[in-house]
Amino acid sequence: MIPDNPDIGHTVGFYFIFLSFVPVNIVTGSTRPGSQNQDSEEVLYDSQLDLQEIVFVIQSQSNSFHMSWAERQRADLLQQTQSLTQTPPPVLLLHSLTDNEGDWSILPLLPYFSSLFGKNSSWLVFLEEETNVKVTKLLQALRKFDRRKEWFLGKPLHDEESTIIHHYAFAENPSIFKYPDFSAAWALSIPLLDRLANKVRDDPLKSDFTIDLKHEVALYIWENGQGPRLTAVPELCTEPEHSPTAQHCATTLRRPAPLCGEPVKKEDIFVAVKTCKKFHSERVPVVKKTWEREASLLEYYSDHTDPSIPTIDLGVPNTERDQVQAMEMPWHGEVRGVVIEGRIFCSLLAPPPEPYMHFLPQRGHCGKTFAILERYISDAVPKTSWLLVVDDDTLISLPRLHMLLSCYDPSEPVCLGERYGYGLGQGGYSYITGGGGMVFSRAAVVRLLASDCKCYSNDAPDDMVLGMCLNALGLPVTHSSLFHQARPEDYSRDFLAHQVPISFHKHWNIDPVAVFNRWLKDESMSTSPHGLNKSTKEEL
């Protein structure tokens, strides 16, 4: 549940970003006597484990579509339990546990889970909304592990190369660190849960960014080699529910109906592309070569009027970023830092400015974005149910977005995209990261503009300011893993393998047209009656 009167008094401090690269080395296993790791040769079998000792946590969201899916998932788990004539396990919906906006980041809730279930349970199993569970097989899989030990279980993912979304962690060998694919489910043994809960109580979580939750949870548990590594469980899978290759799987990916309804029509979504004069010849042509033709209503907003595009000048100037300053960071020797607009970044080399722009808005974005919101509800543009705001270097599949939006009610205040968080452990807020695309229902835009929320300056980070506004209004940010703030190269191959993505962002070190054609273009767009082929629809 979302609090009625959230505290937003931390605003000033939230704009100082401290991200650092810390060289680390993986050790084999944990130094704690009670911990286990994937290299253990001895496989223990806990035949006394009962289903009622497993606590299921569905990572649900505060939106009617997502709540209905989570309720169906809970009903399915309980029905399986009933057919086994066993005492039902606790099945919790994450969004409904407390009033804390940051509950989706899991770590702040660990003390809550420990106090409620630490004495009478053995495992905490987390499920995403699309995770299908075969209860009997999951119970058999968990019985292979000694519940008295510390275990962190899941389907491992790894990075092929160091990536900004993971703060360039393990830059020398990114593949050495494994983190769980949440879609396959992941689990904590109660001994590990209890220790982590004490750690959260004794050492409050830092007020920094939550960007890729699965990676950050794994880092927190690993604790620089002091905690357990992720142990691979082959029964935790991301194969489709009815796939012949999923016979051994305890978890699979549930496939919803091909559509929640008819796809949203082109004419019912207004597209706003943010650009500026310096990118008119570099980025705008990519939009026109790739996805612009799929938009019925689209406008380019710039600091300069260019009739050849055409662009609209909203009267909000772009200002150049402050001079990038490099300095030695004394605690990491050869690592060099970058100070941009008063924010500190680190990398292995002297500053590579472009990749670090992942976290920084172009100046002028907030004023421009709020001007777009005002224009959207004015008589200057056709009235539509949905607004999509993207950067000029966003690559997006509009047909896939139209299908996804068929699952949402535009009469609700829907704010949809890739969700990030800031300071979630200390009363912070969630926001839609802008590069992947921000989708708003008309109802959400009306609520935002009817409030007192506004930019504290034209060059403030628009996505974060909007996040604070939504938090103050008690409006949820709805997450979809199909939107991506970074490039395909920045995500695990296995993670993308079971997706039909909607967007990617950035043109840095890639051919953006080739990326669009590979990841976002559907050959059947013009031939299928609904625009996409059957397999794509099933993914959504």
Image: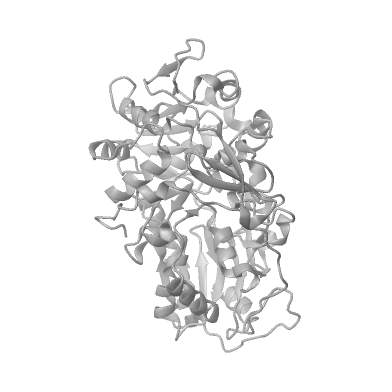
Answer above or below: position of 474 versus 153.
Answer: above
Q: Residue furthest top?
A: 307
Any part of residue 500 in sight: yes
Q: Is residue 523 left or right of residue 436?
A: right
Answer above or below: position of 207 versus 285.
Answer: below
- Looking at the rendering, which quadrant does residue 508 occupy? top right
Coordinates of residue 404 in the picture (x, y in percent): 47, 42
Foreground residue, 487 or 242? 487
Q: Residue furthest bottom?
A: 48
Answer above or below: position of 357 versus 200.
Answer: above
Coordinates of residue 118 in the picture (x, y in percent): 45, 82
Any part of residue 261 in sight: no
Q: Is residue 352 left or right of residue 463?
A: right
What residue lies at 41% left-to-right and 23% top-to-bottom?
Answer: 317
Instruction: Count the labels in the image.
Output: 0
Coloring basis for residues:
one colour
Q: Is residue 427 left or right of residue 47?
A: left
- Looking at the rendering, which quadrant does residue 460 occupy? top left
Q: Residue furthest right?
A: 41
Q: Is residue 453 left or right of residue 245?
A: left
Coordinates of residue 360 in the picture (x, y in percent): 50, 39
What residue lies at 44% left-to-right and 13% top-to-bottom?
Answer: 305
Foreground residue, 98 or 361? 361
Coordinates of residue 417 in the picture (x, y in percent): 46, 43
Quadrant assignment for the N terminus? bottom left
